[in-house]
Image: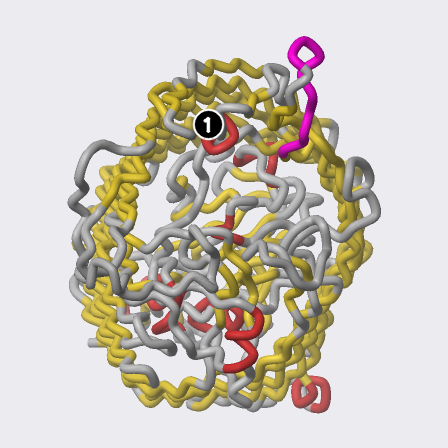
């Protein structure tokens, strides 16, 4: 176990003999030792928790974890999410990266993991999804070889970062080395299914200037036919520190890729052969660009200010044999024309700009130090969605269309949100942290959509004013343990798809509301010496006003029509538990060997409490998620064996086990085994491992459209090996 106190210590060794006079002090040999940087979190074998306060953000009383990526044995070359983030209790992973998406999605507490839509996803503290609220899907994630730590805050993240029911996940990129003017790191990995990954980075510090950057290239033939993909990721960061009080910097992130999508399967296809492909002409590319500039200012020892502005300019283009006919509609040559049917082309252009001004101040209240932290966010996003264009009958990556788009829609979102939280310390062991956030949202929809040969033109503009309150309480019976509780209001705004017209006989409720509710936690966490790390808690989440479609009858005409409206509430409750026990450290505290067992477990009861599906389980919500791992490490070698068991779930709210609808049906429980090991000597490291050792056939998602429709199988047994070096 390492303890960190957020200070920098410089040590000097002085040799001094009794009887020397002050006049001889100049002759005393002095040796200045290497600077030690002590960070603001506590960790044990790769997972820890944030301190009460760090970098203008308050964590007191909140359910949070921090994953130290360098400490993990995992397949980082393909961002194996269940290995890297698997110790987060209750984390559900939708494994679609190999079948047409650029990143696996995550969720907690029985929420929808697809493209992490229930999460507030950030890199280095700024937004990296397609939009802050209207289209918050995550197509880009940084390569894990470049990430130093991953921060996750559940429930109480709504006040500091903007509301999503799933909370915050923040990927923190490595910093430049402070003791070198130049450092070069390279990592080369090969694996099953034609996988090759090359990662190279440079960084350094010279006087007041520091820099860091990386380039990653990855290529895979894929587990199934028609799953070839390549990806190029890059990042550059330049920082200038003119004084101890000020530093400024700029960052740029990019993603370029091209993926082939093998399509989805019916149940019978999957159980006959999960490696089957139903599509050979489906393609996707996702160029991603994020530019960020920031300024940090510390006018006094107790006061900090930060200003961060990011601009995202990205795109997602798709050419595919569409979902008509479901997974059973194979993409075959038409004998009448001796050609394939024309494909469908879609194009989405995403732009957004976000500026956050944050401040914090430590002040005395009675005999205790209190901390206030707050700020304001301004975000503006504009999004163009084009689709239904008739493409070619060819099989190559061709985005050309004949005629016009079947829909051409423009959306915008404007968001202004001031927020503030305050830690009140009552004695030396108890803190109370109330907070408030106010959200102003404006969403617009313009353009057209053709349904049944009728051109529908939305003219939507909605304003919302949403106050959010929360409070966190924490009692620390010992230095390294705490009892915590949190209650925080949350909401999920109407997204762009819910503002689209969807049929001639369909309507959108003019009183359509954002989904709202709250998260609450109560738990006990801490460490005991360097052999036990634990966090055991309960949670209760109310998710009201879920949006769906119901059938109504017009009283004037007597005709039926579909209405998109708020139709149901759901409640998610359960237990989240993480326990890690180091056997050898218990026997001998100073042992250089470590042998640990960890268990990350969650029981989740997520059900609808109103509407047509009252009493049914929420779609994609597994009742149990249990991961058990064994870790061995010494000065040079470390290895981790992990068992991942995820309970069954359903594809939609009806909870049917079989259906002609590609999204409806049963998602069986599964258990997957992973092993990874690393051997380090001086500045070199050798990595080997295997994912899905038992070659389990399973799936985590049923898709109603791309990359399906139908079941999206996960990857079978995979081996990998790599070498890395730092100079």
Percent from the top left, x then y, of residue 327? Answer: 47, 62
Where residue 341 sits, quadrant-wise, is: bottom left
Residue at point 47%, 33% (across, down)? 497
Q: Is residue 462 depicted above or below 529 in this figure?
A: above
x 64%, y 84%: residue? 596
Residue 109 position (above or below residue 189): above
Q: Where is residue 529 shown, x and y percent of the image? A: 70, 73
- Residue 19 picture location, percent across and down: 44, 74
Give yes or no for residue 495 being in the magenta stretch. Answer: no
Based on the displayed image, in which of its 4 quarters is residue 593 positioned?
bottom right
Q: From the image, tell me which residue sits under label 1.
A: 500
157 up-or-down from 362: above or below:
below
Query: How busy is the neighbourhood of tag 1: few (under 14 within 10 Å), some, or many (20 plus)?
Result: many
Query: Which residue is rendered at x = 71% and y = 44% of the image?
Result: 61
Q: How many marks?
A: 1
Name the one closer to the observer, 336 or 223: 336
Where's the C terminus, which quadrant? bottom left
Residue 552 painted magenta: yes
Q: Answer left or right for 538 relative to 59.
A: right
Q: Residue at horizontal 70%, vertical 69%?
A: 647
The quadrant in which residue 4 appears is bottom right
Q: Is residue 178 visible?
A: no
Give the extent of the magenta segment.
549-557
The location of residue 708, given as percent across then percent down, is 44, 59
The quarter in which the N terminus is drawn is: bottom right
In the image, 100: left or right of 337?
right
């Amino acid at each position: 176990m390492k303890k960190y106190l957020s200070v920098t210590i410089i040590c000097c060794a002085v040799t001094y003999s009794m009887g020397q006079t002050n006049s001889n002090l100049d002759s005393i040999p002095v040796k200045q030792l290497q600077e030690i940087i002590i960070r603001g979190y506590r960790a044990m074998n790769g997972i820890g928790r944030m301190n009460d306060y760090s970098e203008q953000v308050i964590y007191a009383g909140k359910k949070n974890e921090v994953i130290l990526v360098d400490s993990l044995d995992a397949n980082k070359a393909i961002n194996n999410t269940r290995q890297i983030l698997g110790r987060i209790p209750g984390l559900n992973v939708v494994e679609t990266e190999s079948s047409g998406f650029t990143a696996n999605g995550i969720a907690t507490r029985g929420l929808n993991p697809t493209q992490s839509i229930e999460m507030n996803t950030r890199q280095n503290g700024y937004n990296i999804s397609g939009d802050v609220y209207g289209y918050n899907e995550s197509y880009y994630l940084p390569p894990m070889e470049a990430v130093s730590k991953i921060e996750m805050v559940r429930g109480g993240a709504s006040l500091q970062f903007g509301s999503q029911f799933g909370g915050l996940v923040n990927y923190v990129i490595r910093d430049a080395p402070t003791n070198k003017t130049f450092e070069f790191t390279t990592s080369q990995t090969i694996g099953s299914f034609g996988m090759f990954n090359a990662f190279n980075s440079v960084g350094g510090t010279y006087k007041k200037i520091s820099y860091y950057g990386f380039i990653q290239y990855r290529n895979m033939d894929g587990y199934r036919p028609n799953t070839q993909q390549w990806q190029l990721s890059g990042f550059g960061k330049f920082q200038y520190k003119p004084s101890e009080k000020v530093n400024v910097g700029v960052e740029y992130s990019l993603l370029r890729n091209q993926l082939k999508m093998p399509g989805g399967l019916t149940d019978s296809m999957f159980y006959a052969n999960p490696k089957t492909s139903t599509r050979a002409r489906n393609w996707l590319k996702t160029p991603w660009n994020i530019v960020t500039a920031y300024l940090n200012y510390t006018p006094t020892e107790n006061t900090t200010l930060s200003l961060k502005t990011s601009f995202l300019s990205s795109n997602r283009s798709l050419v595919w044999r569409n979902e008509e006919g479901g997974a059973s509609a194979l993409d075959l040559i038409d004998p009448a024309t001796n050609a394939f049917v024309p494909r469908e082309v879609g194009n989405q252009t995403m732009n957004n700009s976000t500026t956050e001004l944050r401040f914090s101040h430590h002040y005395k209240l009675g005999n205790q130090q209190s901390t206030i932290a707050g700020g304001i966010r301004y975000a503006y996003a504009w999004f163009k969605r084009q689709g239904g264009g008739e493409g070619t009958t060819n099989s190559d990556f061709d985005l050309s269309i004949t005629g016009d788009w079947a829909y051409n829609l423009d959306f915008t979102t404007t968001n202004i949100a001031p927020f503030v939280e305050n830690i009140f310390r009552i004695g030396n062991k108890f803190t109370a942290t109330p907070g408030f956030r106010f959200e102003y949202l404006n969403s617009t929809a313009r353009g057209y959509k053709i349904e049944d040969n009728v051109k529908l033109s939305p003219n939507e503009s909605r304003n919302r004013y949403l106050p959010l309150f929360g409070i966190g309480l924490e009692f620390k019976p010992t230095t390294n343990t705490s009892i915590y509780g949190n209650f925080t209001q949350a909401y999920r705004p109407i997204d762009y798809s819910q503002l689209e017209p969807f049929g001639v006989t369909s309507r959108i409720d003019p009183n359509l509301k954002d989904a709202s509710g709250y998260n609450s936690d109560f738990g006990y966490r801490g460490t005991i010496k360097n052999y036990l790390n634990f966090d055991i808690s309960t949670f209760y989440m109310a998710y009201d006003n879920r949006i769906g479609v119901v059938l109504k009858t017009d009283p004037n005409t007597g005709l039926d029509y579909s209405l998109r409206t708020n139709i149901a509430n759901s409640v998610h409750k359960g237990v989240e538990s993480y326990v890690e026990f180091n056997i050898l450290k218990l026997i001998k505290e100073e042992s250089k060997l470590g042998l640990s067992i960890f268990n990350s477990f969650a029981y989740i009861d997520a059900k609808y409490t109103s509407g047509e599906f009252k009493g049914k389980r929420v779609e994609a919500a597994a009742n149990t998620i249990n991961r058990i791992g064994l870790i061995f490490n010494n000065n040079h070698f470390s290895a981790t064996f992990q068992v991942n068991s995820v309970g069954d779930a359903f594809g939609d709210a009806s909870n049917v086990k079989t259906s002609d609808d590609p999204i409806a049906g049963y998602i069986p429980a599964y258990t997957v085994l992973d092993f990874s090991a690393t051997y380090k000597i001086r500045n070199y490291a050798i990595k080997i491992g295997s994912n899905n050792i038992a070659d389990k056939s399973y799936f985590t998602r049923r898709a109603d459209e791309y990359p399906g429709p139908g079941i999206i199988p996960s990857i079978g047994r995979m081996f990998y090996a790599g070498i890395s070096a730092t100079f």
